[in-house]
Image: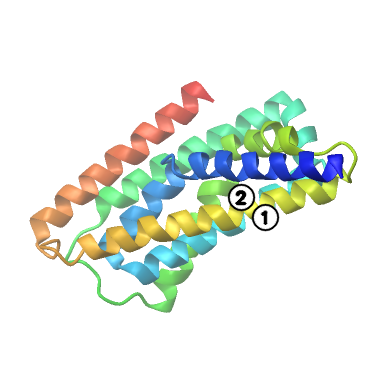
Amino acid sequence: MAQSFVWDINLLFFVVSMLVINLTPGPDVAYIVQQSLTKGLKAGITAIAGIALGLFCHLLFAAFGVSGLFVKLDMPFIIFKILGVAYLFYLAYKAYQQTGAFSIDVDGAQNKNILINGFLINLLNPKVVLFFLSVLPQFVNSQVSRKSQVIFLGLIFIVMGSCVNLIFSYIASRFRFHDFGKLYLKWKLNIFSSLIFIALAIHLAFLC
């Protein structure tokens, strides 16, 4: 009974903590908002799916000990970090490069690219690796299987994050219909998105 009570308290604290973390903008939120503003809610949802898939891969890596081994090896982790930074700079370039009016429909090829980009944003983010290795274990009950708890808590985090991201996407997609069809406004948005990705890349390079 006492163990169940402690677990309930830990789970409640975990949910509150994860909500705060999910409300903190990062590369994933920046990408979702950019896609939702420029291409609409469908594109935003596709980005969310890719981001959730990347998180799920990290969850499996953490649960089965792959992430822990990876972090202990300095050189592979540094290379992984460099790839993550380079990919954010690539997204900055792609955001700056976009021209033309805002899209109304997103075709299959665009959906695939959005999904892949969302997936890689989280897959190549070393902060996600560190999160699953350092934050999730703090909420694990030593009396229960660690692997099953990490997977359970990780799934809660992914679902909560996807719900929060969906709210961001919906709000951004609604703003899209208020005078954002003008070319010069889209150009300004692309510049702003590009600067955000550059800032995130620099932050990842020097503060992670």
Question: Picture coordinates of residue 92 (x, y %)?
Answer: 34, 44
Left or right of residue 176, residue 138 in this image: right
Nearer to me, 105 or 85: 105
Residue at image position (78%, 38%) is 6
- Judge left or right: residue 141 versus residue 196: right
| Mark drawn on residue 32 | none
How far from the left and from the top, in percent, is residue 132? 68, 39
Q: In this view, does 24 lie above or below 159?
A: above
Residue visible at 71% across and 39% down in the picture: 10
Q: Which amino acid does label 1 sit on?
A: Leu
The label on residue 155 is 1
Is mark 1 in CB contact (under 8 Å) with mark 2? Answer: yes
Q: Residue furthest front?
A: 1
Question: Mark 2: few, some, or many residues within 10 Å (few <14, many ≥20)?
Answer: many
The disc label shown at residue 157, or none: 2
* Helix, strand or loop under label 2: helix
**Rendering quarter of residue 186:** bottom left
For this view, does 108 lie left or right of residue 5?
left
